[in-house]
Image (tube, rainbow, N blue to C red):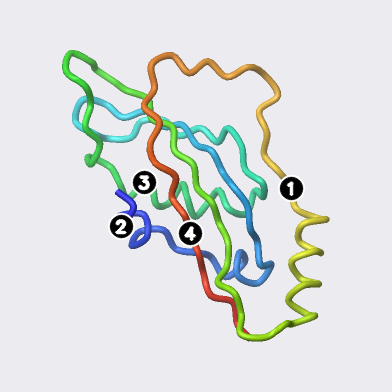
């Protein structure tokens, strides 16, 4: 699964430009054929991370194994975004990361989140290169 997301998740130019980092938590529902029918963003440190994850999840249709005797099943998956360290200290890079941290728009759930019977999937770590 980790390989699938590493191959399928495309880090957008906006994420790279803003040097966005953070975590996102998603819940999705798959039917008995493994097709995704619902995607919910429970939390994201930065809203610009969500579209890349949603696009990757949509590519995963028909890949989810549903427990026997269930018509649908919920999955929870977390993503951790970061960028690969650069060779030298870079004041512009530090400033860009800090500016994005100050101005980012988080997505948070304001109500309780019923999870019912959901399968927690392993965390997906997404590291990307930044231009020097």
Crowding near the residue tagged with mark 4, few <14, some 14–19, many ≥20 C-alpha atoms within 10 Å: many
Q: Which residue is mark 4?
A: 126
Residue 70, placed above or below residue 62: above
Q: Which residue is mark 2?
A: 3
Does the residue at mark 2 contact the one at mark 1 (Cβ under 8 Å)? no
Crowding near the residue tagged with mark 1, few <14, some 14–19, many ≥20 C-alpha atoms within 10 Å: few
Sequence-wise, the earlier of marks 2 and 3 is: 2
Is residue 111 shown left or right of residue 127? Answer: right
Is residue 32 shown left or right of residue 109? Answer: left
Quadrant assignment, res 32: top left
Q: Secondary structure at mark 1?
A: loop
Q: Which residue is mark 3?
A: 58
Is residue 45 shown left or right of residue 9? Answer: right
**How much space separates mark 4 and mark 3, taking CA atoms?**
17 Å
Q: Which mark is residue 105?
A: 1
Does the residue at mark 4 contact the one at mark 3 (Cβ under 8 Å)? no
């Amino acid at each position: 699964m980790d390989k699938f997301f590493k191959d399928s998740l495309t880090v957008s130019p906006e994420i790279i430009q803003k040097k966005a980092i953070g975590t996102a938590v998603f819940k999705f529902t798959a039917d008995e054929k493994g097709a995704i029918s619902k995607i919910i963003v429970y939390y994201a440190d930065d809203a610009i991370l969500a579209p890349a994850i949603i696009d990757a999840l949509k590519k995963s249709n028909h890949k989810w194994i549903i427990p026997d005797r269930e018509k649908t099943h919920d999955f929870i998956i977390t993503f951790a975004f970061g960028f690969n360290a650069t060779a030298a200290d870079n004041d512009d890079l530090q400033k860009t990361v800090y500016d994005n941290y100050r101005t980012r728009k988080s997505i948070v759930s304001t109500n309780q989140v019923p999870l019912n019977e959901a399968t927690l999937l392993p965390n997906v770590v997404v590291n990307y290169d930044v231009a020097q």
